[in-house]
Image (cartoon, coloured by chain):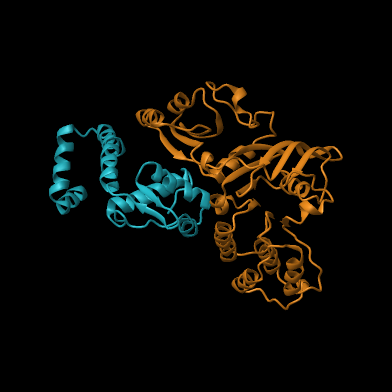
Amino acid sequence: MNTPTPPPVIELTNVTKRYKDTKAVDGVTLRIDGGKIYGLLGRNGAGKTTLMSILTAQDPETSGDVRVFGQHPYENDAVLSRMCFIRESQKYPEDFTPAQAFKAAALFFRNWDQDFADRLAEEFTLPLKRRIKKLSRGQLSAVGVIIGLAARAELTFFDEPYLGLDAVARQIFYDRLVEDYSRHPRTIVLSSHLIDEVANLLEHVLLIDHGRIILDDDAENIRGSAATVTGEESKVAEFTAGRKVLHQDRLGSLASVTLEARLGAADRAKAADLGLELSPVSLQQLVVRKTMTAPAGSAGVEAPAATDPSELEVAP
Amino acid sequence: MLDETRPIFLQIAELIEGDIVAGALAEEAQAPSTNEFAAFYRINPATAAKGINKLVDEGILYKKRGIGMFVATGARTKLLERRREEFFHDFVQPLTREARKLGISVESLTDMINRSNSDPVLTERSAGR
């Protein structure tokens, strides 16, 4: 952590992907540093898969600058051989068996660990000799997860890799991911909407909404960056005046307002004096609050009288 | 075990501190490693490392190169001092605030503390009355 900053693994400058009239990715600028686990979060259709498809050269950008390992990834073997992309509905040759899929992966990924793949297959109780087309949805996902982990690629993308995996199998995935990453640090980009499950695994969070990055911060900075204030409406209004409101609910004379604010000891004392209850907001709740509003640019939340409406926009 | 709404590195640091204060982690004993914390709590290893490094910066833990992290001599005393300072606003202030709200006088609050200190069984019975 005290080492000098190495060059980024990924650098995007004003990248846009347009399909006819819609911008699936809209002017994204970001950098991804090596050796960290990133979470790419957002609603379905927010642009997560499109962004990963651009980075892995499956689908080129319409405009902007894309650098992966310092180069443009499109038709660039030097870059592509260093990365692994596991998609939600990964396609394999149907007559292959998982054993054959692993053999093919072993040829492509130079850091491939066959022992690790075998151990994972056992843990996921994956039938290695059954044809891929006969596998269940969960078993198919297990094939992808095993390849993504055992490949130990310098840059690994997991795009919602757990379709059909039950809670136990997902836990095996998370546990092995943390364990193996501890021993072999590398860059991992994990896209998920099971945010509560993955939150603690992430070092950095990228939140995408309507094709734009609306949150780009260390997971530890985000924890505690929002709070919900509940109590008598006028007291809540007094406390929240001038602060950035993410959401509010009302029940009779009771108000519950979610603030994007890091509350200090003085704030806590003030809330206590006003008889208000403060409750923390989890990453999942924060993501919901930030992405359930209207597209960036039009304030989606009604402002209390005391709050400046210009602060309500979700875009940075 | 971990609360997802506060920085996890702080919670990791607090867990280690708690073990030192309770005596479960003796001075000069080896603390669990970053990777052990990461695997046990299913957290990012960098986060675990940040919590451990916080305690190193504060002189609670120290690093033996190539071996691991150890509890510094005097760490327990240091932590106890800090905990006593925090006791006022973490416990006493909320207590007096709630007492005021319920109309409990300082005298009866003192009385309750005395009772609680001398006979936990009695306190329990009177609370149920």
Task: Decide if residue A267 is on the left or right side of residue A208.
Answer: left
The answer to whether one can see residue A191 in this image is no
| Residue with the most extreme bottom position | A129
Task: Decide if residue A177 is on the left or right side of residue B48.
Answer: right
The answer to whether one can see residue A299 in this image is yes
Between A146 and A191, the one lying in front of the other is A146
**Above or below: residue A291 compared with residue A119:** above
Between A130 and A285, the one lying in front of the other is A130
Residue A30 placed where, x, y %?
A: 68, 38
Residue located 59% across and 71% down the image? A123
Q: Write down the colour of chain A.
A: orange
Residue A186 placed where, x, y %?
A: 63, 53
Residue B38 placed where, x, y %?
A: 49, 56
Residue located 43% across and 36% down the image? A278
Residue A98 placed where, x, y %?
A: 73, 72
Task: Decide if residue A205 is on the left or right side of residue A12.
Answer: left
